[in-house]
Image: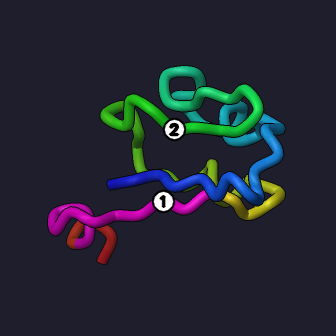
Amino acid sequence: MRIVVDKDKCTGCGICKEACPKGAKIWDVKDKAMATNLEFCHLCTICAGKCPEQAIQVIRDDEHEKKDTE
């Protein structure tokens, strides 16, 4: 699993961090947002849904993650 932030779209507003159930454990927001410590991520995709700039993509690239969402 990866969380990709489009640095050209991200304004650093911090809405992703505020909306995320794990907030500060995952999100580091200074000038731009950056997702770290993804072992805490629940794959809820709230961050991507709340981003006003549509700058966040949650990419599930492990086989077990794909099966869990089908």
Confirm whether the magenta stretch covers residue 62.
Answer: yes
Between residue 43 and residue 28, name the one nearer to us: 28
Residue depicted at 40% across the width and 43% down the height: 42
Front disc: 2 or 1: 2
Between residue 8 and residue 28, name the one nearer to us: 8
Applied colour scheme: rainbow
User: Are there few (<14), some (14-19), or many (20+) residues within 10 Å of tag 1?
Assistant: some
Drawn side of residue 20 relative to residue 62, left or right: right
Residue depicted at 39% across the width and 29% down the height: 37
For numbered disc 1, what is the local secondary structure? strand
Q: Which residue is mark 1?
A: 58
Residue 58, horizontal then vertical, whole percent? 48, 59
Q: Which residues are magenta?
A: 56-66
Residue 17, horizontal then vertical, whole percent? 66, 33
CA distance for labels 2 and 1? 10 Å
Choose top left, top right, bottom left or bottom right for residue 55. bottom right
Residue 24, horizontal then vertical, whole percent? 58, 21
